[in-house]
């Protein structure tokens, strides 16, 4: 049986693609294969463009997040310094109102402000 198969295999190998449309079939297969390769290349190019776009967008988002983090850090630092200044001012007001002589000074200043406002409205 091996002796019979060997001639057929050698004959098939020798005439492969030549018998009854074999040439056309193999050329059609290769053209379909080339078309598929071209489609794959176009699809890969489109995917590459999409990946590049997504990479750029994610990079832009990262930069935006970093800038917002820096801005929030600066705002937090400014709020801390404002809180320090405000607490210092409140401590000074407490000291002014605790002293009796300071109360007189504050009432004198308030009366001058009221007097100034009255004169301003009368001359207007």
Image: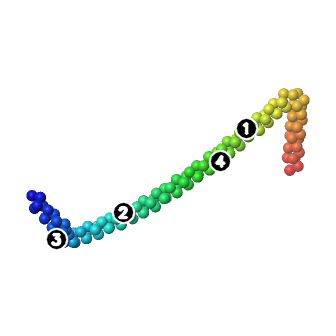
**Residue holding disc 2:** 40
> Who comes first in sequence, dot 3 or dot 4?
3
The image shows residue 106 at horizontal and vertical percentages of: 87, 34
Q: Nearer the viewer, residue 3 or 44?
A: 3
Q: Is residue 3 above or below residue 107?
A: below
Q: Is residue 4 above or below residue 103?
A: below
Q: CA distance from mark 1 to mark 3?
A: 94 Å
Residue 118 in sight:
no
**Residue holding disc 4:** 71
- Judge depth for marks 1 and 3 and give the one in front: 3
> Who comes first in sequence, dot 2 or dot 1?
2
Judged from the image, the secondary structure of the residue bearing numbered disc 2 is: helix
Q: CA distance from mark 4 to mark 1?
A: 18 Å
The image shows residue 83 at horizontal and vertical percentages of: 73, 37
Is there CB contact under 8 Å for labels 2 and 1?
no
Q: CA distance from mark 3 to mark 2?
A: 32 Å
Residue 105 in sight:
yes
């Amino acid at each position: 049986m091996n002796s019979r198969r060997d001639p057929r295999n050698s004959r098939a190998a020798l005439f492969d693609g030549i018998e009854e449309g074999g040439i056309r079939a193999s050329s059609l297969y290769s053209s379909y294969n080339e078309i598929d390769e071209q489609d794959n290349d176009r699809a890969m190019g489109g995917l590459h463009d999409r990946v590049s776009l997504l990479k750029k967008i994610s990079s832009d988002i990262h930069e935006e997040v970093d800038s917002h983090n820096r801005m929030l850090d600066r705002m937090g630092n400014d709020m801390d310094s404002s809180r320090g200044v405000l607490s210092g001012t409140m401590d000074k007001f407490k000291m002014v109102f605790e002293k009796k002589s300071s109360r007189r000074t504050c009432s004198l200043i308030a009366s001058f402000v009221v007097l100034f406002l009255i004169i301003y409205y009368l001359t207007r």
